[in-house]
Image (cartoon, rainbow, N blue to C red):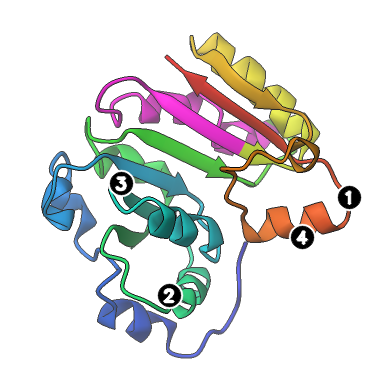
Amino acid sequence: MRLRNVKGASLKLESSDYIIKNYKDYKGNYKKVFNNDNPIRIEIGMGKGDFIINMAIQNPNINFIGIEKYDSVIVRALEKIKTDIPNLKLIRMDANVIEDVFYKEIEIIYLNFSDPWPKERHKNRRLTSRNFLEKYDNLFKGEKTIIMKTDNRKLFEYSILSFQDFNYKIYDISLNLGEDNPIDNVETEYEKKFKSLGMPIYKIEVKK
C-alpha cells in the first residue's frame, strides 16, 4: 500500500510521540520504550493502521508496534489516533532489516494482507517466505506465534507450506473469516473492503 505526495509527511513523523525514531537503539530492550514488562506484539506492514490501533485500544496490557515502509501511509495511521494510546508505537522501516531491530522480545507477529509478490522470481520478498521466517526466529521471546490474514488464496496456500516446512504447527485456520465471524476479530482496512464485496478472507495462526 502506498500513498503519494502527502504534504509534510516527514515532519509529521518527526514530531509524533508515537514514532520510534532511533529504533535500532532499543534492540533487545523495547520494554524501555513502554516503561513496562508487558508482552510486545508487532504488525509488519500495518498499512493505514486500523488493526494495530484498535488492537492496542482493546488490549491495554499488551504493547503493540506497527511497522510500515512508507511515510505517506504511516501518516494516515497517525491521523486516525484520536485519543492517547500509551501501549502503541509505530516504526517507519523496511521489514528486510527487522532482525536488526528486535531480539528475543516479541510475543506475536501479525501479517495482514501482505503483498503477495505473485511472480516466482520475487518469492523471497513474501513475508512468509523462508527468507523472512529465518529473520523472525530470533525476534520471539518464547513460543513463536505468527497470525496471518489475506484475501489472496495463492499466497495463503504458499504460506501454509512455508510455515510447515519451517516447523510451524497450525493452531487455527479459517477459509472464510467473514462467515466464521469470530467475536475477537479486529478488522483491517482491506478486510472491511473485501468483506463488503463478499470476498473470502483467509486466516491462519501458527506456532512453534
Q: CA distance from mark 3 to mark 1?
A: 32 Å
Q: CA distance from mark 4 to mark 2?
A: 21 Å
> Residue 81 has which mark?
2
For the record, the magenta segment spans 121-148
Q: Say what amino acid the circle numbered 3 marks.
A: Ile
Q: Are marks 1 and 4 in contact (CB under 8 Å)?
A: no
Left or right: where 9 falls relative to 21: right
* Label 4, residues with CA under 10 Å away: few <14, some 14-19, many ≥20: few
Q: Say what amino acid the circle numbered 4 marks.
A: Lys
User: Which comes before the other along the chain, label 3 or label 1?
Assistant: 3
> Residue 198 has which mark?
1
User: Which comes before the other along the chain, label 1 or label 2?
Assistant: 2
Residue 57 seen in this snapshot:
yes
Q: Which residue is mark 4?
A: 193
Q: Say what amino acid the circle numbered 2 marks.
A: Ile
> Looking at this view, is 68 or 58 the one in front?
58
Secondary structure of the residue carrying tag 1 is: loop
